[in-house]
Image: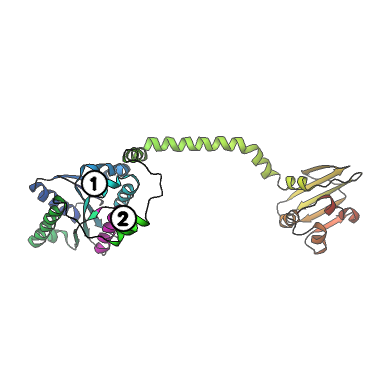
Amino acid sequence: MKVNIYYGGRGLIDDPAIYVMDKVSKVLDELNVKVQRYNLYEDKRGISMLPKTLKEADAIVLAASVEWMGIGGLLWQFLDACWLYGDKEKIKSLYMMPVVLSTTYGEKEAQFTMVKAWEMLGGIPCNGICAYVNDTATFETSTEYSYLIEKSIENFYRVFSKKMSSLPSSSMAVRENVMQPKAIRLTPQESEQLSEFVSDESYVRQQKEDIQELSQMFKAMLGDDAGQKEEEPYIQEFKEAFQPIPNVALSFQWELTDIQKKLVFEIDNGALNCYYGEKEDADVEIRSTKQILEKVIHGEAPLQTAFMGGKLTAKGNFRVLHTFDSLFRFR
C-alpha cells in the first residue's frame, strides 16, 4: 500500500511537524506501507500538478505548521488544485489524516479547516494528530508524546487498510447539492493536462504574450474610431439630431469652460459643419460646462430653457439663439 504526505510548512529545522512526519514514515514503513513525501515549499510552481499523484495513493497525510493563522498558503494552493484538477472519483476513496502542529494559537481551527476541506472535496477524513508545541526539544524527546503519535498512526493504518466506512456528514450533503464546481467538466486526463499547462511557466508566459498581442491588434483596429470619438465628443450626437431648415445660414460657437474646448456649428442652407476650433464671427457665442451640454443632448433641458434658467450664458444675435432648438431636436 502507499501513503502520500503533503507538507505545507516552510521546512524549518525546529518545525515539530517534520518530527511527526518522520514518525509517520517510520511506523508505516514497519507496517510495509510505502510512504512518499511532497514538500510543497520545494516546488511552488509544481503544486498544480500534484493532484495527479493522488491516483497512486491509498491514503494521504496533510501536514501543516501553524506559525500565525491557518494552514498556510501552500496547503491551500494544493487543496485548490485538488478542487480544480483532481480526479474526484479517486478522491472519494482516499482517506486523509490531518497533522497539525502549532507554535502559536490555532491548531484546532487549522485541523478543522483541513477536515472540512477534504470532506468538501469528497474524501474521507480520519482522526489525526493535533498539538500545540511550546518547546520543540521537550516535545520530541517525550516518550509519552511519542507513544500517542505512534498509536494515532497505527489507528490511521487500520482505517485505510481495511477500507473502513465512515458515518455520513452534512458536509457531504452540502457538496452534493450545492458546492458543484462551475468550471467546464473535464475528464481526469484533461484535468491532468490542464494542471501541467498551469504549472508550465513558459507556457503561461507565452499565453499572456499572445493575449497581449491580440489585445494590441484589436486596439489598433479600433483605435482610429475610438480615438476620433475621444477627441471629438458630442459631434456625432449633434449630427444625428440636426433638422435642416432651407435658406438659413448662421453659426454658433459653444465654449465648454471645464475642458477648455470650443465646438463650432456652421449651418448653410440645410448643411451642417460641426467641428472643434474657433470662429470669431459666430452669430451666437455660448458658454457652459460640458454637463449642461450633455443635458441638452439628452433632452433634459432645451438650450432656451437652460439659458433662461441661468445654466449657460450667451451673447450675439439672440434672434438666432431661438432657432437652435429648432435646428437640433434631441429626444
Front residue of 80 and 58: 58
Q: Secondary structure at mark 2?
A: helix
x and y percentages locating residue 45 in the rendered image? 32, 42
Quarter holding the N terminus is: top left
How many labels sit on residues?
2
Circle 1: is it few (<14), some (14-19), or many (20+) Cα within 10 Å? Answer: some
**Residue topped by disc 2:** 120
Dividing the picture into quadrants, the one containing residue 231 is top right
User: According to the image, label 1 marks what residue?
Assistant: 39
Q: Is residue 36 visible?
A: yes
Q: Main secondary structure of the magenta part?
A: helix
Residue 84 % position (x, y): 35, 47
In the rendered view, tell whether residue 20 sits above or below residue 247. Answer: below
Where disc 1 sits, the SS reads: strand
First to last magenta residue range? 105-123
Q: Which tag, 2 or 1, sits closer to the chain's start?
A: 1
- Judge from the rendering whether residue 189 lies leftward or rightward of residue 22; answer left or right: right
Label 2 neighbourhood size at 10 Å, few (<14), some (14-19), many (20+)?
some
Q: Is residue 60 left or right of residue 79?
A: left
Position of the C terminus by quadrant: bottom right
Q: Which amino acid, by three-letter code, is at mark 1? A: Asn
The verdict on residue 203 being magenta is: no
Left of 275 or right of it: where is 250?
Answer: right
The x and y percentages for residue 289 are 73, 56
What separation in Å lies between label 2 and label 1 (alpha carbons)?
A: 23 Å
Q: Is residue 119 magenta?
A: yes
In this picture, is 9 found above or below 48?
below
Q: Nearer the viewer, residue 229 or 283?
A: 229
